[in-house]
Amino acid sequence: MNAIAEAKHLHEEITAESMRAHWMPFTANRQFKSAPRLLVAAEGMHYTSHDGRKILDGIAGLWCCNAGHGRKPIVEAIQKQAATMDFGTPFNMGHPLGFELANRVIEISPKNMGHVFFTNSGSESVDTALKIAIAYQRMKGQGTRTRLIGRERGYHGVNFGGISVGGIVGNRKLFGTLLSGVDHLPHTHLPKDNAFSKGQPEHGAHLADELERLVALHDASTIAAVIVEPIAGSTGVLIPPKNYLQRLRELCTKHGILLIFDEVITGFGRTGSEFAAQHYNVMPDMIACAKGLTSGTVPMGAVIATPEIYNAFMTGPEHMIELTHGYTYSGHPLACAAGVATLKLYQDEALFERAASLAPYWEAGIHSLKGTKNVIDIRNTGLIGAIELQPREGEPVKRAFEVFLECYRRGLLVRTTGDIIALSPPFIIEKSHIDQIFETLRDVISSTP
Ligand code: PXG
């Protein structure tokens, strides 16, 4: 039996009872288990569903499979590494691929970056960066700088640090008091002024000045770091207004506050540049990343930091651990093998350049949906986009969810957040796929009540 037939066969055996044990993440478990949607194979731009249908991947898995699915050089590198050395402790031991991957990451990072700390996910990258920020201030003799500033509508993963600086109430309210000493900038979503902007919106740079208000309230001497997504992804693709990130950078520098960019989604070519930092020409002090680092093939994240930060820790007796932080699987050999092969593939196939060169076609495609029934805003940059729908009276979220289900039925995978449809295809996408995505969406949105 081939893999797909086997998976279909397995599906036939799946019953409500056999699905009970798996508590699924960020999923309406009961709805799902009453009508399961299973993916069983993936290649190039497509998934195969359990019922044997080809599904066009409009979201690169979940903003991560930037090189497309089942890419041979990555698959073979993982296979080879699994057979060569499965695991080795990352504490006081190393393996060659960890160093190679760190060097390759630095090669494509903003020029002010120098060091890479490996994690296993975006959430771990965020919490690692926040810990490094607080510890760095202490190492510099500024131990009172412990406060962290996030932003409303920010998503920084699901660990305690990330949800504390994050700004999504649904992800926070169940979990108690979270970290203390956290405050938030206002979000930058100004639909009245900026609806249907192509790329960066005109209005909203002044919202960065809110940091001055927070400094006046708390005093700079209590603030360690500001963390923002250069483009807020999970809350519906909020593109930074022109000059907003520049102003935030200036204010952080002025007040001795570290600026952390959460580039879990925007890193590794999504904007058409290596990182959003280069795209917007604003250099943070640290970058949290994950997803595209291995094109989603093996879980891995990283924090990229400046030499200034790294060197602040390289003091004290040389036999002592400088940063008491790390995960059993930091720099896991399989993840490093996948990462090295992925970054090489991005380079060999010039995939970031490909994303940049397709961006105008993508932009024209997505904005052609302006005027479609219930579409109240469209946002885009690089190979990322969002279509915001008017929520149905008294039934928020439902209209977009129905669009998601109908797209899936018609062979297209999109992502929804609230009443926003988010898109972020693999960079190997062809113009014909772009046409298919927007034709399908136009039809489905028009016919959804
Ligand atoms: N930061 C950002 C900016 C993210 O987008 C994370 C951190 C956390 O990464 P991990 O690997 O721990 O999941 C993310 C993750 C969505 C969606 O619907 C996006 C993410 C995760 C789940 C759903 O847009 N991004």
Image: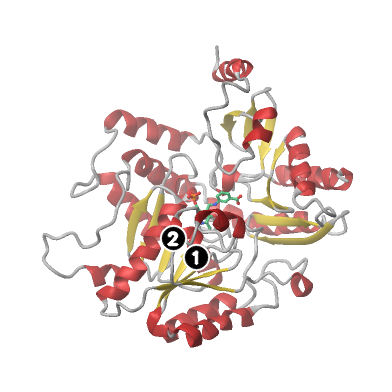
What residue sits right under mark 1 in the picture? 165
In the image, residue 353 sits, relative to residue 238, either above or below, namely above
Q: Amino acid at mark 1?
A: Val
What residue sits right under mark 2 in the picture? 161
Residues under numbered marks 2 and 1 in contact, where contact means CB atoms less than 8 Å apart: yes
Crowd around label 1: few <14 · some 14–19 · many ≥20 (10 Å) = many
Report whether 192 appears left or right of 240. right
Q: For the residue labelled by badge 1, is the local secondary structure a helix, a strand or a loop?
A: helix
Q: Is mark 2 within 8 Å of ligand 1?
A: no
Q: Among all residues in the image, which is located at the extreme front?
A: 176
| Tally of numbered tags | 2
Q: Position of residue 400 (x, y in %)?
A: 76, 48
Q: For the residue labelled by badge 2, is the local secondary structure a helix, a strand or a loop?
A: helix
Q: Position of residue 198 (x, y in %)?
A: 72, 66
Q: Nearer the viewer, residue 35 or 8?
A: 35
Q: Position of residue 69 (x, y in %)?
A: 55, 37
Q: Amino acid at mark 2?
A: Gly
Which image quadrant: the N terminus?
A: top right
Name the residue rendered at 40%, 71% in the picture.
285
Q: Nearer the viewer, residue 4 or 137?
A: 137
